[in-house]
Image (cartoon, rainbow, N blue to C red):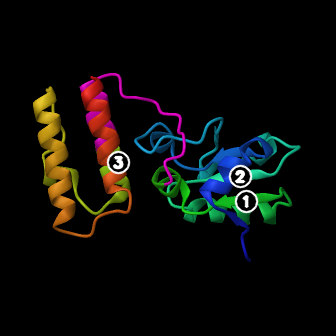
Amino acid sequence: MAVAEISPEAAQRRLGEFHVIDVRAEHEFRGPLGRVRGAILVPLPELEARAKELPAGRPLLLVCRSGARSGRACEKLAALAIGPTLNLAGGMIAWNRAQLPVERTEPGSLAELVASATAWLAQVGSLAPDAVGLPLAQPTRESVEALLRRIEGGFRASAAPPDLDLTLASFRRALARL
């Protein structure tokens, strides 16, 4: 089944026409890539069970990290005769690369920042948290910056996830703020 897609730039211009449904996990929704303004979190594994909760009256813009899960969400909703739906092409990675506005939940402490980095590492799965020295029991600004350098170096030596630079930049902005 072909899923209708929309570019981040076109979606931003038409944002008022959609109900934005983010199908990522909660840690991603609150994580370094942020979220589209006004997005409603309905993680993909819960989508079918919560389909009746989805707002009506406007097309649904489905969003995830890269566009893959939101594409599957569009297919699931079409099978349930819910729609119309549009998939955000490239997901929040493409949205951030286009430098479009995002809502963010900033870590409130160094420990929360380390927890966010741990969750991100577990999600991308290419680099084991113990390979970079996680977790940090009592993080300091210096130890968190060293951790971010180790994450960056570890991925530079292997296949880096497509959001590495965006994620590290977000983590470093949060670190500077803390």
> Dominant secondary structure of the magenta stretch?
loop
Residue drawn 29% across the image and 47% down it: 168
Marks 1,3: beta carbons within 8 A: no
Q: Is residue 28 left or right of residue 19?
A: left
Q: Residue 86's mark? A: 1
Residue at image mark 3: 167
Q: Position of residue 123 (x, y in %)?
A: 38, 54
Residue at image mark 2: 61
| Of the image marks 1 and 3, the number of the one nearer the N terminus | 1
Q: Position of residue 8 (x, y in %)?
A: 60, 55
Q: Amino acid at mark 1?
A: Leu
Q: Position of residue 23 (x, y in %)?
A: 60, 50
Residue drawn 53% across the image and 39% down it: 102
Q: Quadrant of residue 5?
A: bottom right
Marks 2,1: beta carbons within 8 A: yes
Can residue 47 be spotted in the picture?
no
Measure how far apart labels 2 and 3 are at the Cα level.
Answer: 23 Å
Q: Residues within 10 Å of mark 2 (few under 14, many from 20)?
A: many
Which is more toward the observer, 43 or 40?
40
Q: Residues within 10 Å of mark 1 (few under 14, many from 20)?
A: many
SS at mark 3 in the image? helix
Q: Amino acid at mark 2?
A: Leu
Q: Is residue 108 magenta?
A: yes
SS at mark 1 in the image? strand
